Image (cartoon, coloured by chain):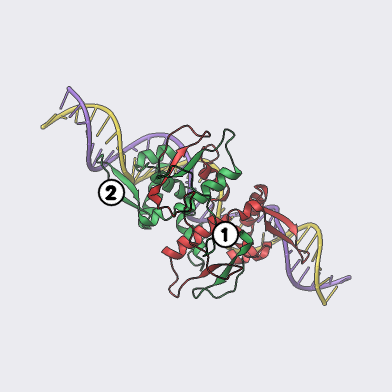
Chain colours: A green, B red, C yellow, D purple
Amino acid sequence: MKHTSFKDMNCSLAQSLEIVGERWSLLIIRDTAFGIRRFDHIQQSLGIARNILTQRLSKLTNEGILVKARGKAGRMEYQLTDKGWDLQPLLLSLFQWGEKYQPHPEGERMCFVDSTSGNPIQPMAVRSSDGRLLKSADVWAKRGPGLNKEIVQ
Amino acid sequence: MKHTSFKDMNCSLAQSLEIVGERWSLLIIRDTAFGIRRFDHIQQSLGIARNILTQRLSKLTNEGILVKARGKAGRMEYQLTDKGWDLQPLLLSLFQWGEKYQPHPEGERMCFVDSTSGNPIQPMAVRSSDGRLLKSADVWAKRGPGLNKEIVQ
DNA sequence: GACTAATAGTTGCATTATAAAACTAAAAGT
DNA sequence: ACTTTTAGTTTTATAATGCAACTATTAGTC
């Protein structure tokens, strides 16, 4: 392997990146979330090589992020599981950061809204247990039982 | 390995991934956020090859996520900029997802707390403008002026 | 029911990013 | 003046990526 595995790192971030932290994975997950669920459609949407797409889809399926199933049209499609949908905060954080720092000259590319009211959602942010918005400097990391070393953010 | 660039994709997610969506980048950003800021320290912390680390650090510096500066000890160090700290929601989303789906047998690896109260922060979640927690199915994507095609999440 | 087209991949080969190790120049410490 | 640490660079190999062509299965049409 020319890629070093992150599996031995005892860090939940590294564990997540081992599964989802690869060039195409989150774009595939984005497509399935947007309703692009069939092999050829994803391939055309992303311009990804077909063999690489095969590899990524089977990895995401093995990890329980996608399930392969026969869709309404009778064709196979890849659907997000609950585990996959749980990546939504991550996806939206990436969308919003990209929109903030690499904006399109003509304005916002996509706007995410609450389906009931139609109003835009709030920016992804860190909140205290009593609901206050926290600045990055106000978030500290404490070791838990699964870890040994003391770390401070 | 050749890599297709995401820069031509008119998608803020793809733009973000072009900068930050690479195996090591977010781990480097994690380290700098945790106070591991010097070349050798990052290299030992991650086990990353030195030439790759050089490449990543200069990319992250060129993108304005890190700045290279002389630290208190007189040594060079890489510090997060505001743009870099704005990735915190993304990092915490990844941490929490990894903790949920790849937990450590002995319990939570890290606990992020509000520095003033010491209480754990809330799980990263999507909220409507009036503060309600939204389920993934309740979030819709609308095209903005920077985009042409209609997409629904 | 045979023929055609679309779908969902697989195979083989060329390219290049990654990795590992050894090497180097500059600064810091003694 | 000497050694050590730091922050990289250089060199070589290997494996992941990308591309194009090919294949097997399913769906639609006459």
| Residue drawn at point x = 51 percent, y = 66 percent | A11
Residue B129: x and y in percent read 49, 48
Residue drawn at x 58%, y 47% is B19
Pointer 2 chain = A
Q: Secondary structure at mark 1?
A: helix
Query: Which chain's residue wears label 1?
Result: B
Q: Residue A96's x, y, as percent?
A: 54, 47
Q: Residue A51 placed where, x, y %?
A: 40, 45
**Image position of B17 with respect to A106: above or below:** below
- Choose top left, top right, bottom left or bottom right for residue D27: top left
In which quadrant is the C terminus of chain B drawn?
top left
* Kind of residue indicated by mark 2: Ala
Q: Nearer the viewer, residue A94 or B129?
A: B129
**On the picture, is B38 further left or further right than B124?**
right
Q: Are marks 2 and 1 in contact (CB under 8 Å)?
A: no
A63, above or below A143, in the image: above
Task: Report the residue marked by disc 1.
Answer: B27
Write down the residue under mark 2. Answer: A69
Label 2 environment density (alpha carbons within 10 Å; few <14, some 14–19, many ≥20): few
Q: How many marks?
A: 2
Foreground residue among A59 and A151: A151
Residue at mark 2 to residue at mark 1: CA–CA distance: 34 Å
> Callout 1 environment at 10 Å: few (<14), some (14 to 19), or many (20+)?
many
Q: Is residue A128 visible?
A: yes
**Secondary-structure class at tag 2:** strand
- Name the kind of residue labelled 1 in the image: Leu
* Residues at marks 2 and 1 on the same chain: no
User: Does residue B56 appear in the picture of this structure?
Assistant: no
